[in-house]
Amino acid sequence: MLDALKFVQGSVAKKELVEGLTHFLIRDGQVQGFNGVIALGSPIELDIDCKPKADPMIKAISNCDDTVQLTLTANGKLSIKSGGFRVAIPCIDVETPHASPEGEIYELDGARFIQGIKSVAPFVGSDASRPWACGVLISKGSLFATNNVTIAEYWFGNQFPTDCIIPAIAVKELLRIKANPTHIQVSENNVTFHYPEGRWLRTQLVDAEWPNIRNILNVESNPHAIDPALFEGLQKIKPFAEDRPRVYIECGVARTHFDETEGASFLLHDSTITGVYNIDVLMLLKDVVKSADFSLYPKPCTFFGENLRGVLIGERV
């Protein structure tokens, strides 16, 4: 039971902006959560239909060490008893806007899709003025993400029936679940990812349109393997950078300040890397990117990984 509750807890609203969204919906042997954007569902071993407050119910089940007994009390609360432990969970008895899967079903190479999500997730933006960038674009067999400084594309091979944008909160849940979806269900405004054992994640789609970014990615370059000392050096010198964590790289040295006599520096193996970059942005390439061409600076620099390509914009001095 606890596994089912933990699976769906990521879709429970934090605040009661709409009545019922901080509550689970338990009905017909299934538990659901919905926060207005994503919904999660899982079978649950409980033959009671109720809408308990989600947070205290998870805490209560977590504290149960012996056999768990659940009953509805006369005043409409869910009584949970285990050994000498007993707690009453508040429930509501009103209509709630919990959402369920809908639409046409399509096959999906879940392992490759999730690998693609892992690869592009670091590049998802958070600028609310660009809602199209606050998620992952699925288009013609590719996944795209951008934070307005980098753009990444991952080829995963599956053809979704439609181009769509999965919001960042759904991307986070797809990675949290740590399982591969077996198939998808697609409707006009939402997509549901189905998992083994009858579990599912449904997400609303971002109502926006990406600009044409494929031309930006089609850059001629001469990439070579990224110097492994680059990320080690960035981690060591970042604490000595100013409020805006810049790194100046030239002649085989990465340093935090324009003035060589200030801040910290680190010797690199590759003396061909050049440019000025945001340290945090460069660190996004760690463990994802295998090769890059930094010689293109100050123009956008290219980078490549497994089934992945992208561009990175440096900073002006």
Image (tube, grey):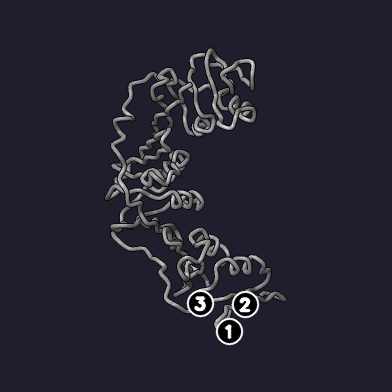
Q: Quarter-wise, where is residue 119 in the image?
A: top left
Question: Picture coordinates of residue 49 (x, y %)?
Answer: 48, 77
Secondary element at image label 1: loop
Tally the numbered discs.
3
Question: Picture coordinates of residue 82 (x, y %)?
Answer: 67, 74
Question: Picture coordinates of residue 78 (x, y %)?
Answer: 57, 78
Q: Which residue is mark 1?
A: 73
**Residue type, label 3:** Ile
79 sits to left or right of 119: right
Secondary element at image label 3: loop
Q: Which residue is mark 3?
A: 92
48 sits to left or right of 208: right
Single out the residue that lies furthest toward the right.
Answer: 84
* 87 is higher (above) or lower (below) than 111: below
Single out the residue that lies furthest toward the bottom.
Answer: 74
Q: Which residue is mark 2?
A: 88
Which of the two marks, 2 or 3, is nearer to us in this view?
Answer: 3
Q: Are marks 1 and 3 in contact (CB under 8 Å)?
A: no
**Residue type, label 2:** Ala
Using a 10 Å C-alpha cutoff, classify the residue at mark 3 as few (fewer than 14 neighbours), some (14 to 19) or many (20 or more): some
Q: Is residue 287 visible?
A: no
In this rendered view, identify the residue nearer to me: 196 or 278.
Answer: 278
* 97 is higher (above) or lower (below) than 113: below
Question: Picture coordinates of residue 170 (x, y %)?
Answer: 44, 52
In this rendered view, identify the residue nearer to me: 258 or 207.
Answer: 258
Q: Are marks 2 and 1 in contact (CB under 8 Å)?
A: yes
